[in-house]
Image: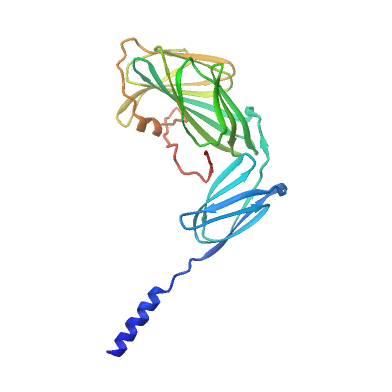
Amino acid sequence: MKFKLLVALLTLILCMVPVIAKAGNLTIKVEDNKEVDVSVWNNDTFVNKTGTTLVFELPSGMYHVLIQYGSLSLLKRVNLTENVTLTINLTTTNNSSLLIKKIHTIIYPNNYLEVYEVLILQNKANKIFFGDVQIPLPQHRRFEMLKSTAKFENYIIQNNNLVITNTTILPNSTAEIMFSYTMNSNNFSRRVDSISETLILVNGASKVKRSPFLISQGVEQFDGEIFEVLTANLSGENSYYVLMAENKQTANVNLAVILGIVIFSIGIILFVLDRGKEWEIENK
């Protein structure tokens, strides 16, 4: 009886001994000896350090790493299962001609047009893009910024142009900026000032009048909703229009569908704006 009691006590004691998670080193190295502020955290840990080469000894697990240098804020997720070294190059460019632009538009015809747009910006440079991004908008009202995977300082509407200031896009990566506005007429017309790819989804199966170079790809269905798909590849200064039928049936906006639709080819491949990325931009 005493032996069984002793075994039970030893088992209880062993169960109470904490299990120490395997530790690893996360090393941040900054080129050109630039001093950065780095925060590393998860649900159980938060550590902050400043310097040019920083070493964090941490238990194994998934961590967020925020690297701040002046106005730049770079956010990375790291799965620490062994020693990891991140080498950071903070060289920037503000040359917006290095950005490849795609504009994807979703139109819901009602008594007025409800327009949702996704501006896709691809940074093809080997440097961080840090500068202003500008695109023309149609005549509109009730503009609203909805979502962004790019960090930016502010945005303004100036002479019917959307100007997004101090936008940060990582080298050889893509960012999406989503916004909405309404129009007072049934005519969607906009100007383009650079090389871009355009894709337009018009809610409902009714045909619309459009610019000759807007090519209809037919009708597609997303989560039970019908959209006519129009595409074009534009170069330089240009403009296009989509004219809705006066008797076109009104439609209720489905935000779940809109947030799930971003299209980057004629074949219509979907991806979600919230998809996981190795590198992210923090947008405070």
Residue 266, by quadrant, is: top left
Q: Horizontal and vertical percent for residue 109?
A: 36, 18
Q: Horizontal and vertical percent for residue 225?
A: 31, 27
Q: Horizontal and vertical percent for residue 247?
A: 31, 11
Residue 97, by quadrant, is: top right
In the rendered image, the quadrant that contains the N terminus is: bottom left
Horizontal side, residue 174 vs residue 52: left or right: left
Between 142 and 178, the one lying in front of the other is 142
In the orientation shown, which residue stands out farthest toward the right?
Answer: 32
Instruction: State whether residue 84 is above or below residue 35.
Output: below
Between 58 and 251, the one lying in front of the other is 58
- Which residue is pictured at 34% across the width and 17% down the height? 110
- Which residue is pictured at 59% across the width and 36% down the height? 168
Between 31 and 14, the one lying in front of the other is 14
In the orientation shown, which residue stands out farthest toward the bottom?
Answer: 2
Residue 202, by quadrant, is: top left
Instruction: State whether residue 247 is above or below residue 102.
Output: above
In the orientation shown, which residue stands out farthest toward the top?
Answer: 246
- Which residue is pictured at 63% across the width and 28% down the height? 96
Instruction: State whether residue 13 is above or below residue 107.
Output: below
